Image (cartoon, helix red, strand yellow):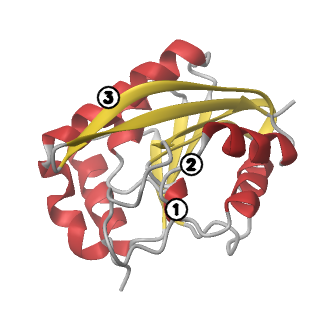
Amino acid sequence: MNTFDNKAASWDDDPAKRERAHAVADAIRARVPLGPATRGFEFGCGTGLLGFALQADLGHVTLADNSAGMLAVLRDKIAAAGIGNMTPIRFELGADDASTAGYDLVFSLMTLHHVADTRRALADLHGLLAAGGHLCIADLDAEDGSFHGEGFDGHCGFGRESLGGLAEAAGFASVRFDTVFHIDKAGRRYPVFLMVAQRP
């Protein structure tokens, strides 16, 4: 069982997660042209908080995750809202066929630091985009490991210069970063950046 499956049912109960998703959606809207012809792909969508926040700005959005529990919650939310332009799929970056390529916007929120091979992930995300498409990654700035605590085997955030270099090496251009949110946790504030890059 995916470790996120057990968290799925109560994931949306946290108002901070909802606030974070809306802040990131606002930041994406301010930086990337969106419209009825825009095809979006959310990588590591979870229960779709960010996808829902952008849904009305996109022609269609595919929401991809490898957690069956998260996808089950997401499907129920889409059905309850009667939304017709959202499609959830089970998807493992680097393992599944990226036949869904040709998106105008690929985006994620607090997902990349869970992926072991950042270089490969960025290359795979590049492959999902059409020429001229945008990648929008929201994630943690580099931190001392206190955010997740002992036993976490992912990345302790990212240095912006390092991640930007990896994005350029994967073929992206016009890479830029902005701080778009802060997460308050255990008396500390952790900055969340938005990296926006374009596939030439």
The answer to whether the residues at label 1 and label 3 have Cβ atoms under 8 Å apart is no
Image quadrant in which the C terminus is located? top right
Q: Visible in this render: residue 81?
A: no
* Closer to the camera in the image, 51 or 157: 157
Nearer the camera: disc 1 or disc 3: 1
Q: Which residue is mark 3?
A: 22
The answer for how far apart the CA atoms under marks 1 and 3 are is 24 Å
Identify the disc placed on residue 158. 2
Q: Name which residue type carries label 2.
A: Phe
Q: Residue 171: name its quadrant.
A: top right
Across and down, in percent, residue 23 comes to: 34, 26
- Coordinates of residue 101 in the picture (x, y in percent): 75, 50
Which quadrant of the view contains residue 54? top left
Distance, label 2 to label 3, CA atoms, is 22 Å
Q: Position of residue 13 (x, y in %)?
A: 12, 50
Closer to the eye: label 2 or 3:
2
The answer to whether 57 is drawn above or below residue 186 in the figure is above
Q: Mark 3 falls on what kind of element?
A: helix
Provide the residue designation for mark 1. Answer: 155
